[in-house]
Amino acid sequence: MDINKKYTPQSWPDHPETATMEGKNKFVGFWLLLAAESVTFASLFATYLALKDKGPSGMEFTAAGLFELPLVFAMTMILLTSSLTSVYAMYHMKNHNFKSMQAWLAVTVLLGAAFLGLEIYEFNHYVHLGFGFTNSAFSSAFYTLVGTHGAHVVFGLGWFIALMVRNAKRGLNTYNAPKFFLVSLYWHFIDVVWVFIFTVVYLMGVIG
Amino acid sequence: MSSIAKKSGFGATVWDYITSVDHKKIAILYLISGGLFFLIGGIEAMMIRIQLMKAGNDFLSAGTYNEVMTMHGTTMIFLAAMPLLLGFMNAIMPLQIGARDVAFPFLNSLGFWLFFFGGIFLNLSWFLGGAPDAGWTNYASLALASESHGIDFYALGLTISGFGTLISGINFLVTIINMRAPGMTYMRMPLFTWTTFVASALILLAFPPLTIAIFFMVFDRMFGSHFFDVAAGGNTIIWEHLFWIFGHPEVYILILPAFGIFSEIFAIFSRKRLFGYTALVFATILIGFYGFMVWAHHMFTVGLGPTANAIFALATMIIAVPTGVKIFNWLLTVWGGNVSFATPMLYAVGFIPSFVAGGVTGVMQAIAPLDYQLHDSYFIVAHFHYVIVGGVVLAIFAATHLYWPKMFGTMLSEKLGKITFWLFFIGFHLTFFIQHFLGLMGMPRRVYTFGANQGWDLFNAISSVGAIFMALGVIIMLVNIVLTTIKNERVGNDPWGDGRTLEWAIPSPPPFYNFAQTPLVRGLDTYWIEKMEGNKEGMIYAEPLGDIHMPNNSFIPVVMSFGLFVASFGALYHPDGYSWTIPVLVIGLLITFGSMLLRSLKDDLGFHIHKEDLIKDREGVKTDGHK
Amino acid sequence: MINGLKKWRLFTLMTALIFFLAGCGREEISTLIPAGGVAQDQFNLLLLSSAVMLFVIIVVTIVYVLAITKFRRSKLGEEMIPEQVEGSTKLEFLWTAIPIVLIIIIAIPTVYQTFDLADTRTMDVEAEDGSMTNLTVNVIAKLYWWEFEYPEQGIVTAQELVVPTDQRVYFNVVSADVKHSFWIPSIGGKIDANPENTNTFYLTFNQESSELEDGVFYGKCAELCGPSHALMDFKVKTMNSNDFDQWVASMKEEQTPPSDALAQTGEELFGADGLGCIGCHAVSGVGAGNVMAGPNLATFGDRNRVAGILEHNEENLKAWIKEPQDFKPGNQMPDVKSLNGGQDVSEQDLDALAAYLMTLTVEQ
């Protein structure tokens, strides 16, 4: 593999992310990592459900009284949209259109940052109400589940930015194409986890 | 300069190993550190047996005994058995499938160093205020009540080494999926590769629940959360579930590779194809699959209710079927063979009765109502030592003898090997067989002492005598290793003479690029096929000789692991209220993530070994013995 | 001569019996000498599963021994290359099917017993006179001791469980601190004492403990709970219903104050104006569970052991009071010096305390 090889849209392979052995390995390995991540989140969800609304006697906060759907719905929409924009970026990556890819990645990062900002606002709001991490078993489980997702968003944003900056000058090749592909895959996974969080934590929390 | 020339000198060799991404060198690192931890765990075991040698003994105090007992279990499972098996997987599996290395050599090194720093961190607890004392299962209510930092060392140490194991698991899976030589279909893979594959899949799915449970423990003990704090709405049963959702597959993570090793040995030393290869493969997959559905059989007395207990009892019994299939297939492999009782085969032959005994007591404990009596008694101690020592440790010893020539190019002494086997085998049964009866006579496990006149004195004394035999066996094995290394008589490709799989087709030890040309695999036991057809070279090739692409060595894995090691100290002392703890935590994480970023940003394209050098190297092999 | 032979035979028989019993452990604690209905059921399961497993072991052993003796290289020669057999579908089927049959044989009683041992339907059934048909005992496990509350009778005791022999006894088991496990090996299998929920199960007691050599059955904590886990023993006294009713009645009676002077001094020391032992230890059997910090001592004089582990005499009692940490590391009882404002307590005072505690009895 020659890192200095220049590609044109014509010479660019159909599946640049798996065009090299390294790319193939990364592709399979990353899917496996996502399997492990799924089990991680499954454990967190199970714990959250077991500890939902559990606290010391006289605890004032419950899911039904605490969560407000409009804000969370807005966050959901933003994150879903960012998933879509990362799909656009991958579309341009496959067509060897580096500039458009970078542009769509930038949009993705901005949406992700907006989501993160809202999440920080939300957490801050709860803490001001008196619902902190050390408040009850319920609060610990809630912050750990949603916070772990938040940490994944932070890591994903950092990854996006690092790749965009690192490759800004040298463009696409079969060495970095798998990296772009993986981070977008990661981003989709984060999105899917959020859909579960929205459903299990917020919707079921407010309704049931 | 030749692309395969090396620097020499002791410092250069050490540096080469520390930064190495070569699966064979990482295997040796696993073997050394796993062996070291095995000795530490063994000393702890001896202390336990000295303490329990007679009623009311005061060799260890109550608190110290709990620390020794906890560290014995934790060390043996996480820091000895698993790394030693990972070592053999690393050394042999890529060779068996005809690969030049694992899929991610860098991650392979990272996995090792994470394990290593995690293990060191855990053992530092002995010197920094006391080791963990809540058992290797670390049940939450006791763990939260434990006052010293021991539990924190357990939680953080296992988190770090757990990441390492998870990374290794992913690495092996990708290696086996993507890097098999042409013709090496799944149903032509050697059994050791198959069991590595399934065990890695179990690692992948079993370690995350443990990591999560341990994170809860870390948060509860160090950062004020309430997952297991009953007064604040927490629930300690959550720990038990998460721990055993990990813990039961963990047993299979250990025993499946052991099955793989014995499968190789039965075929080689019976000079016969494995009987029922397909059945063995499917039994392996089934055991791995069922392994995730039986965790609550560790919790029959928790009070989950009769429905849950009955379901988990039945599910557990079913596992006996594929395990039985394996035993009979091994026996039938021996049947009609031409059996040589070299040391590895001696271990394999000793393994069958030991493991059958451990297996049948397992089924007995699956009977939930009977388990109400057996649970947490010495019966269970006897049972799991029968499967883990009688299965896993015998496999590790067998593999040490079997693969030593492949890894180091010289044979361990057969004479000393057989002495070790007999001492260890007799000592093992003497120590643990009698413990079944201690349990049935009402002796609970994890007791630091026992009163006289409960009918347990004689059997405990016998058990302690057995432990001495085991210790002698291990000491002779160490002597064997030292003497063998000093003698250093070089051996050829196939020192046992009856090798069947690809690893025996190349020099011992193999050159660092493994196969100069990728082999073409024509069936199960490919080396055997070539031998039988009179192919002197032992394999045919799938490609012409050409340049080989190799990865660069890297120091980054050590730095990344060291960062987590540093960060752990920050987290550990956080509840004590020192002002430096959070900065240390942040600095440690910055080291880790910073080196991760560096790795990501810096292009690391590896290097090429040129064709001419390969030809020279091969001629060197011919003139220069097996250097 | 004949007589001598007879004696010899009897002797041999007795020796064999002793060895057999030694192999089974002591009747106070061994699961192999069941003295309760639950333990008997579990022992039967042990026998059944052992028989099935013995069959498996015999089959494996036969094949194993034949395989490793018949096909040795020393017999067959170095050069012989055996036929490379792939396998046999028939055999694979056979050794899949037979184990399944064996498992079904043990699965059926397993499921039956699992549900049977969890059957609490007769627990809160009232008899015609309004009393319960079965006794219920609330077991509260605490760091290294056990509290037994009899809610219907309104009495509470510690360290020695007293139960009738001719009925099911239901237990509500819970922990007040860390996880423990409640186990009386010769009576029946264990159940965990969790901190977050109460577990309910039953046991039946078929033998009166007065028939035993030590006069009590031994109970154990079976879940690691800290340094003194090994010492968290309790004892079980079983008696017929009449004796049990009598015991309950005398538990409810007020303790007669001690008559001799030494014990009277002891009582004063025990009280709030003395060392204040009474702040943690009630001496009346009437009361509820989980109220006092220390074990109820109403039956202390009747006990089989001091602190569950030491031989029951005044010497041991005094030693225990002086330095409880020497005997049960990590237990919650303060040593007597700290109760005396840091001053050593005189031997006479200890004698008085011990004398008083030994007068606390309900079984006369």
Image: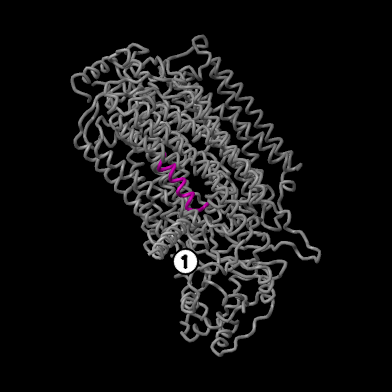
Residue C294 place in picture, x, y as percent: 58, 71
Residue found at x 71% / y 70%: C154
Q: Is residue B9 visible?
A: yes
Residue projecting furthest to the top = A10
Which residue position holds label 1? C329
Viewport quadrant of the C terminus of chain B: top left
Residue, x 22% and y 32% (percent of image)?
B8
Label 1 Cα crowd, 10 Å radius (few <14 / some 14-19 / many 20+): some
Residue B600 visible in the picture:
no
- Give the structural element (helix, strand or loop) at label 1: loop
Which contiguous range is marked in magenta? B375-391
| Chain letter, disc 1 residue | C
Looking at the picture, the colour scheme in use is one colour
Q: Is residue B169 left or right of residue B28?
A: right
> Which residue type does callout 1 highlight?
Pro
Which image quadrant: the N terminus of chain B? Answer: top left
- When the figure is inspected, residue C185 is found, relative to residue B160, above or below; the finding is below
At which x and y percent is residue B406? 30, 29
